[in-house]
Amino acid sequence: MRFLRDAVVVTSILCLVAGAALAGVASHLLPTDEVAGWVLRETPRRFTPDDLYESIDGNADLFISFGFEESAVGDYVPTGADEGWISVEVYDMGAPLHAFGIYRVEKADGVEAVPIGVQGYESAGLIAFWKGRYYVKVSSIEGEGAVGAPRLAETVAARIGGESAMPVERSRLPWENRVPGSERYVRKSALGHRFLNEVVSARYTLGKARAFLYIADLGELKKAAEAFAKLREFEGETGAEVADVERAGEAGFAVRDPYYGEMVAAHLAQYVALAISDEADRGKLADLVRRALSRLPRDDEKGC
Amino acid sequence: MGTSGKERDLTRREFLARAAAGAAVTVGAASGIGVSVPTARGEEAGEPGGMKYRILGRTGLKVSELGLGTIKTENPGVVKRAIDMGVNYFDTAECYRGGNSEVKLGEALKGAREDVIVATKWHTDGSTPAEKLLASLDESLKRLDMEHVDLIQIHGANKVKQVESEELWEAFTRARDAGKARFNGLSTHGNQVEVVRAAIESNRYDAVLASYNATIGERVGPVMAEARGANVGTIAMKVLQPAHQGKGSEAFQGLRGNPYQQAIQWVLRDMNVSTAIVDMPTFEELEEGVAAARMRPERAELEEFERAVELASAGSCRLCGACTGQCPRGVRVADIMRYDLYAVGYGDRGRATELYRSLPAGRGAAACGSCSECKVVCPWGVLVRSTLERAHALLA
């Protein structure tokens, strides 16, 4: 009998491993061994951009817009018990910056970051973190997964290789006056503009005023110049007076935007930088933009 | 929302000028006096060329024909611009962006709360205790920084059991009595027809939010009419799906207009729909969407769009899920139809094969061999048996 039971266990594990292998890379990160008394119930489900909506419904478009490639979802149950459930979702976002981006979209500003993976957060019944190109969410019914959920999250984090480092793109944002933890990445259509893509942003405190800085990397000077021109044209069409700003990159302008307040924008090399605030004055915003442009790595300087 | 190739190079000003000119011509041609024509129900009202409004069933709320979905829309500028353009219906949910959709929407609506209608959602499997649902609503209100929402809806109801839950009804009643939600409704993606009918028959729902577009209009349209007849507000979502699906197809090449705009207009031509919600995260998409809602295209133009959609999806599975659970032998028909679409429609045979081979034993189309006649009926006329056989031959 014992032989039979062991054979069943071994076969089950082999099936799970084989299933995981079929199901894609993200599945390999789901532990198949028992973790703190919790075991994988069945072969993880795999989702791709075409059927992600079956897993997360309306949020699918959002994940896809951040570069989602595939996900694996595993349900864990307590060993030898009928009740209890922990779900582990591993999202392969294609690149660390994308994983960071979707993590920041889902982490509310006031929620404290916790040290898991590169960074994570916890809320009722949920532990979420990002590391490498992966964004991971561990959900449980409150109370039931009190021990298992953190251990599963730590185990998945440990299985993701590579360093626990914030995206290098964050360093484009000047550190002075930057509000810690306010950094974001927007892959497409920052501030509602189709032409402002690949953007890192952060909140700043300028004196007592709150301001936001956005830096778009358009990949080449021509595209940055086009995006800048479109932005200027858009602002002009609102009827607001657009004024030139000197000593700000190749060209700069300032405007009172009807929706975002004071705005200063400029472009240099492949970048467009803009600062907005409904509290700070133009002078301070222009200084922030100048500081940002002065420290950006430029493709045309590589190898010099 | 997207833009057709010929629109892509237009500047915003050119596009708007062209859209406005188009609206003037078509509206003028339809009514003869250059203003929108009220329906027999007197529901359509609005300034010439401006946003039009309809009544959301028994709620009596006057909602803009085009509403804003906020899964991807987080820029306060876009939300404020939408209000300026006449949009007054905003849809969010407790889980969109991990709750941040509600936070951002609440921030963007500061100072405009009295002028807009806000709908959010809560999750229930039908047995979720009322206390838990009410706690979910409290969290939503906190994130929105509002004292009440106008509509609280079940999120993604796909079973009649969810619709008829007494716990849910208790939660709806208590939320309304506490002044936290003025009206109640549901959203549905799967099993839509049965779910909406159950909502109508229960006589407890003020509004329903369902997927409705030119691809599945024949199936969902009648139940939207039934809801409207019962004075239940009707909200359409997944409105742009036909344009997304058909954009690369030959059938769409000859279309005169922008298919994304036509997809919106196709839904709004149905006066049984109170409002159509579309996620429009950029100013450009918002302007395209609002321009589409303002226009009243000629019937022939929408018929041309309908034919293109039909051609683009002819004989192919629309992933409506109606075949789920129909096979008496337990063949996973809906899954296999989807894998077949991956292989034949999208040309991704590798992934389709991988998925097909990971089906549990006995759930593949090999089991079809023991049936003389396929019992599965597709509402769209897809030849299920031969599609399953093809999938098996390709993917097994």
Image (cartoon, rainbow, N blue to C red):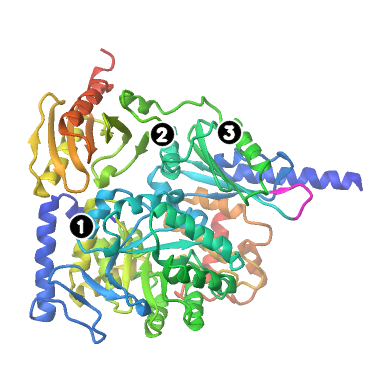
The span from disc 2 to disc 1 (Cα, nearest Å) is 30 Å
The label shown at residue A157 is 3
Q: Quadrant of the C terminus of chain A?
A: top left
**Label 2 is found on which chain of the structure?**
A
Residue type at mark 1 is: Glu
Do dots 3 and 2 share one subunit? Answer: yes
The label shown at residue A97 is 2
Q: Nearer the viewer, residue A7 or A296?
A: A296
- Above or below, A109 against B211 in this view is above
Q: Is residue B326 visible?
A: yes
Q: Residues within 10 Å of mark 2 (few under 14, many from 20)?
A: many
Q: Secondary structure at mark 2?
A: helix
Q: Which stretch appears magenta?
A: A77-82
Please report whichever mark, 3 or 2, sits nearer to the chain's N-terminal start. 2
Q: Nearer the viewer, residue B31 or B108?
A: B108
- Above or below, A11 against B7 in this view is above
Q: Secondary structure at mark 3?
A: helix
**Label 1 is found on which chain of the structure?**
B
Side (left or right) of A160 relative to B360: left
Q: Main secondary structure of the magenta part?
A: loop
Q: Position of residue B181 (x, y in %)?
A: 43, 67
